[in-house]
Image: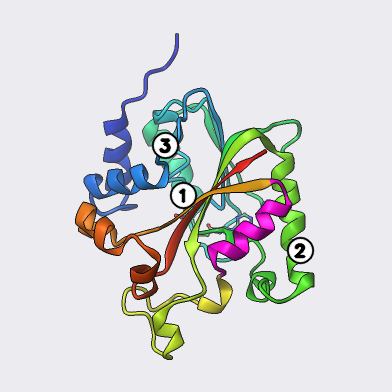
Amino acid sequence: MEKKYNLERYFEVIIEAGLYSRAERLKFHLEYLFKGIDFSGKRVLDIGGGSGKYSFYAPFKGAVETICIEPEDAGSSSGVISKFNELGSLLDVENVSIETTTFQDFDPGDRQFDIILLHNSINHLDEDACIDLHRDQGAQDIYQGLFDKLNGMATAGAILIVCDCSRNNFYPFIGFPNPIDPGIEWNKHQSPETWSNLLAISGFSKKSIRWSSLNPLGKVGRVLFGNKLMSYFTTSHFCLTLQNK
Ligand SMILES: C[S@@+](CC[C@H](N)C(=O)[O-])C[C@H]1O[C@@H](n2cnc3c(N)ncnc32)[C@H](O)[C@@H]1O
């Protein structure tokens, strides 16, 4: 018999695990992140998925299989793999698994995915190459290789969601730490346009670039801050959605 997943249980477990402050804020964020995306019957790949906050959402929305690639590498906090396993037991889901390897070493076999997520991880895949990506052919070749590999595991029409901070932000421009997130290493980021142009060469065409707002401000924040200009003065965080041909 088909297993029924209760979404409220997902929110309860994620909040109790300390992975988000409040359920309604997380709901708001997930609705933004996956706007217009239907998980029913889909296979999902979450690259650099950390402790699986997004991987575990997928079955609760109807995905049939989710694989999270998480090597505990650059940009990670230690213990995320054990946290992932803990969440798996608490949520009692059967169709979400983790591959504790890098994307570079991940062997998909003949598996293909309909929804692919790179949430705050694209720049960590190869940080050294990411630094020079906007101006260096060698760096572009490295990422092109990764994106070609990604394309090989994407179904026709697959949706790719890429979220990260852009390189361009007011505070580093004037030489100050960003007051919202002082730890961001801006030189290890790239603009959504840079990512989108490279991904286009590997067969992913751009559907939209959205600019994230300050989540605790909810809908009002979305109206005021969810655009490129205001984002430049906050975190420059974007959500780029693309589609495989
Ligand atoms: C900033 S964390 C983002 C975690 C999660 N996606 C989130 O948004 O909460 C970046 C993740 O990328 C992972 N990572 C780094 N290098 C990677 C690689 N080569 N392949 C796959 N994942 C990688 C890190 O281990 C880390 O968990």
Q: Of all residues shown, which one is farthest toward the bottom?
A: 175
- Percent x, y of residue 188: 57, 74
Question: Which image quarter has ligand 1?
Answer: bottom right
Q: Which residues are magenta?
A: 190-203
Q: Is residue 28 above or below residue 177?
A: above
Residue 31 is drawn in which quadrant?
Answer: top left
Q: Is residue 56 left or right of residue 71?
A: left
**Residue 199 among magenta residues:** yes
Which residue does the image show at 57% across and 63% down from the upper left?
193
- Residue marked by disc 3: 36
Q: Of all residues shown, which one is farthest toward the top?
A: 1
- Percent x, y of residue 61: 40, 29
- Percent x, y of residue 150: 69, 46
**C-alpha span from label 1 to label 2:** 27 Å
Mark 1 falls on what kind of element? loop
- Residue marked by disc 1: 51
- Residue marked by disc 2: 142
Q: Is mark 1 within 8 Å of ligand 1?
A: yes
Q: Is residue 97 above or below residue 205?
A: above
Observer-nearest residue: 86 or 112?
A: 112
- Badge 3: residue crowd in 10 Å (few <14, some 14–19, many ≥20): few
Mark 3 falls on what kind of element? loop
Task: Count the numbered circles shown.
Answer: 3
